[in-house]
Every structure is written in structure tokens, then in C-alpha cells.
Amino acid sequence: MVSEYKTSMMPIPIFAKKLLSAFLILYAPLAFAQSDMQSLPFDTVRLDNLEQFGSPGNQTWHIAGNVSADRKQTGNLAETKGRGILVYKPLKQNRPLTSKAKFGNADIELDFLLSKGASFQILLHDRYGIKITNDWMTEVNPGAKAPGLWQHLTIHFQAPVLDKNGRETQLAGFKKILLNGQKFVNETEKQHINTPKQSLNQSLTFIGNELPFAIRNIRYKTYDEDLIRISDTKFKVYQGLHKNPDTLASLQHKRTGTTDTLSHLVGDRKSQLAMEGIMDIPRDGDYLFKMIAGGGAWFYLDGKRIIDNKGTRDFERAFYAKYPLKKGKYPFKIIYSNSDECLVLHYEGPQIPWQSLTTPASMRVSERFEPLEYEVRNKPAIQRGFMMYRNEINPYTASVGIPASTSAKEKSGNNYAYDMKRYNVLAAWHGRFIDVSNMWTERGEKQLEIPLGAKLELAQKPLLASLISSEAPWPDSAQTAEGVFTNRGYKLTNNGLPIYFYTLNGTTVEDLIHIGNDNAGLTREIKTASKPGTTAYILLAEGSVIEQTNGGGYAVDDKSYYIENLETGGVKPILRRDDGRQQVILPVQKDTLTIKYDIIW
């Protein structure tokens, strides 16, 4: 029977309906907003002074606010007063610097900057060493950068297991070392072995040599053996797939039972699985949960909905949520609409590295291909495809591999990626070219080109723009109705290098990139032709911080790379700030203009 209840209310306008829908979504019963955080924060070694180190009166080390080094001058390191950077300058009697913090199993990260010729050593437990040397443009560690640039070191350390006499029953070592994101070849042996327990030092020690260097952003996570424990787990399986987990309250399950594992295999394909039990939290602190599922998935803890993946079937997409917990036992529940047989729940906690609460069999592994290297031999190579840029796909990429010049055959070549929509250099890297397994194996659906070196990412913005003044914001794309340049494309030189060309509002550009002198980087030559009265500008560089260097060049993006040997045809570059970042731009003030500079990293 249908009620004939009437009301004098006017029909709800479409806008009001949308507003009501937004209200209901906003106030859905999530415990809190899901997080974009993908890792818990590190502990840091404060570098306001040397108080976090156990070396009072050590004159070899001090704190500075900024440093710079001439990459061509051995031992050159200048500094300015301030805080945040640890500086080593050798004296007649040099002393190591040892942290007060103790390290067992640990992940450690730091940045370092070498003067030309400098080297230093990092020791853990006074026994396990990493030697940092100037490996720039060598085959030993091709991820290394030039002197005077900040580099990033990542250390994954496994502490030894000792018996009651302090002798190792399980060896310690470095599980992984990365330099600028690339595998680091560590040629340093252990300094000592089987040190008595009473003299075992679990600190982090820096040892300098004859030339100065600097360190900053020292951060770490230490781990012990306490983990989350799961118990009293029960499950129910329901027929069909349901978008709303609350629907299950009105349904009859088709089977039920207990389980000692968390896995989609507990349930059935194309069915709804509900698992609940007790989660024993080992200590107070923030916990970060990560859920991946092929189908709708919901994670509840202590009666609160922690993660909702919005019904996605993308089993490569992760959803994160940070949640503060006290030590103790909490009820939990997981509900999964088994569309694609993938249910994964990971967590990170205080002094707990990433762990899985679900079994390995509950993960659906994406198809993985053996690396397929595109080798560059005696002539340049060009490959169109997609490339990851700051965790997003750029689908307009042309990668170019350039072999070493004849005068530098003992060195590896240099490579770059060019954005064929914005017409600018997107990234550059030394050494081997690209892995094309995602492109040329089976369907090649992802079309990803994967650089086989430490990728330097540049600004993803057009090289050329029309600005009403030098203070106007720089556009993110070409300033045309379609967002692309006109008369665009590329042609090849006699030796096979591309020259990119295009036009914007009467200004034409030709852009050639080739190997720099002595293979040190890339040399860029830009030629422009403009009609009188145009207001075109060239974007030479963008970064968080840009500093001028000796010789009229620039250290770009907080010393990520150099621009050197800059020739601008007599036009003065402008160093400015745009949307919180610094830029070097050049007005195109002549009918024809040739710009040339080196990119060194």
C-alpha cells in the first residue's frame, strides 16, 4: 500500500540534492579522514648544535646554516652561519663524531655534500662501515652526483644477535644501501669482529678524512621484535557482492567458522567475506594501516571504520590511515567484496617496520616482467612512451640515450626524457638507458619507460611562455586553446640527435641537447626567432632554492644540479619567485637569440 501523504514543500532543486549528497558523504561514519601519509615520520638528529653527539670539545665538527663548494676546486667548501647543517673541516688532529642515539635494527637516511676529492666513513656499532667517496661519473656507483651537490643516502641495517658473552650468533650487516635511489656498492669491510659485549658501541659514527664535507637531514627509525598479534578470528561468507557493508546485517550467511589467518581465501570468489577477531597492540603510539583490495573493502578497529577503499577493483592502489592506539586488545573487523581475489592489510607502528596482517597468498601480484634493457651503443637512441614523474604518469615522453663522446669512451653515456607536450626536458640520468619490459613484453599495456639510473627530475613546465611582465606566473602548459604548441615536432641531426621545434605567438624555438664536454653532463642549445613586440620568455631553471655560483652559473633546486657556462647573447637572466618557488627566466628581447648552457648533476 502506498501512502498518499502530501506536503506543501517545494520539490528539492538539483543543486540542493547535490548539496545533500555531499553532506551525507562528508558525514559518513568514518572514524577520521583517510591519510595521504605513506610512512610514519622518522626521528631526527637535531643539528641546532652538537648536543646530540657525544664528543664535547670536538673542534673538527661544527654547525652551519648553508654550504657551497666549487666542484672544480679540490677541498673548496664555503659556509654561512646558521643551523641545520653538520660541517666537517679537518684539523691537525681529526676526531670522529659519535651520536648519543643507539641503533639496533634501523633505517637511516641523510643528505651529504662533498667538496671535490672529499670522502668520509659511516660506522654503526663501531664495526660496520660505509665509505663515501667521490664516485661521480664512475661505473662503481653511477648514481653519484657531482661535488657540491646534495646527495641522499638510505641505509637499512640489521643488527647482530649476541650471546651472553657478547659474541655474534647471527651476523649483522647492511640489508640495503641506496645512493640517490640507486643500489650503492659498498667496498668497506667490517672494521672489527667479535667485540666484547661490554665495549659494544651501538651508536652512529662519522669519520672524516683530509678534505671537508657536510651532512644534513639525519633521520632514522629503530625497530624491535614486538608486533601486532591477531587472535580469536571468526569469519562469515555471504552470497553475492554488496557495495554497502551494512547490508550484511540483514542477510543470512552461507557458511561460517574460525580461522588462524587473514586472507581472501577464507571466503569465496564473487562473495562477501567478513572476518573479525582481537588485535593485540604491543605499545602506545601512532599506527599506519595500508589496505589494497580488488573489490570493496572496509577495515574497522575498536568499532570505528578506519579504511574504506570506495569499492575500487584496482588491486595496485593502496589506501592509508593513521590511527593512535594504546597498548592493549581491540576488536577488529574486515569486510571484503571478493571481485578480484586480492585482500592485503599492512601496518607500520612505533618501532615496528612494515608488516603484513594478511597472508602472502592473499595478495594478487601484478604481472612482473624480467628487465629488458634498451642498450645504447654507438649512436643515440630515441624511444617514445610514458614515464613516471613525481609518482604520476607523464604520457608525452620521448627518452633519448646518448653514448659517451669519443674523448670520454671510458665513461658511461648520459640520457634525458623530453616532454613532447610542454616541450621541455623532463628528467636526466647518467649511465644505462631505459628498461622497456613494460612496453615490449606481451601487450605492453603500461608503456612505461623506466630509467636505469638515478633520475634527476626537472620542472614539468613549458620552456617557452608569453608573459605580460617578468612578474607574471609561469603557465603549466602551452598557452593555446588546445594546450599544445603549433608547428611542432622534431628533426634529426646528422649524428641522430633530435632537434625539437615549435611556435608560440610568433616566436619559434629550436632546442638541441647533446653530450657536454668530457661527458660531464648535457649541453643545451636553444635558438629563438621572434617578431617585433613579442613578450616571450625562456624558463632556464626552477627549484625550491636557486643560488648563483662562481662564473655566472646557478645551483638549482637546493643544489640538485648546476647550470654552467651560460651564454645568453647579452640578455640578462632574471632570478625571481613564482608560486613559492624560484625561477631563472630569460626575456627574448632580440629578433634572433641563441642560448647555450650545460646541465651538470
Image (cartoon, helix red, strand yellow):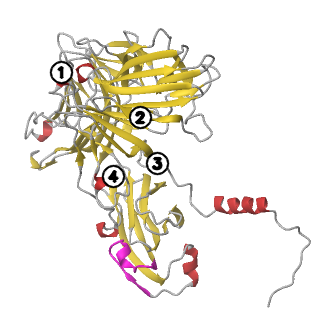
Residue denoted by label 2: 490
Contact between marks 3 and 1 (CB within 8 A): the answer is no
Query: Residues under labels 2 and 1: Cα distance?
Result: 27 Å
- Density class for disc 2 (Cα within 10 Å; few <14, some 14-19, many ≥20) is some
- Residue in the foreground of this view, choosing between 469 and 314: 469
Q: What numbered label is drawn on residue 352? A: 4
Q: What numbered label is drawn on residue 37? A: 3
- Density class for disc 3 (Cα within 10 Å; few <14, some 14-19, many ≥20) is some
Query: Residues under labels 4 and 3: Cα distance?
Result: 16 Å
N-terminal of the pair, mark 4 or mark 1, is 4
Q: Answer whether residue 238 is magenta in the image.
A: no
Q: Answer whether residue 269 is magenta in the image.
A: yes
- Density class for disc 1 (Cα within 10 Å; few <14, some 14-19, many ≥20) is few
Mark nearest the camera among 3 and 1 is: 1
Kind of residue at disc 3: Met
- Density class for disc 4 (Cα within 10 Å; few <14, some 14-19, many ≥20) is some
At x 34%, y 57%, the residue is 444
Residue 525 located left or right of residue 159:
right
Q: Secondary structure at mark 3?
A: loop
Q: Secondary structure at mark 1?
A: helix
Q: Residue at the far front: name it.
A: 494
Residue 66 seen in this snapshot: yes
Mark nearest the camera among 4 and 1 is: 1
* Residue 119 x %, y %: 20, 22
Q: Which residues are magenta?
A: 255-272
N-terminal of the pair, mark 4 or mark 3, is 3
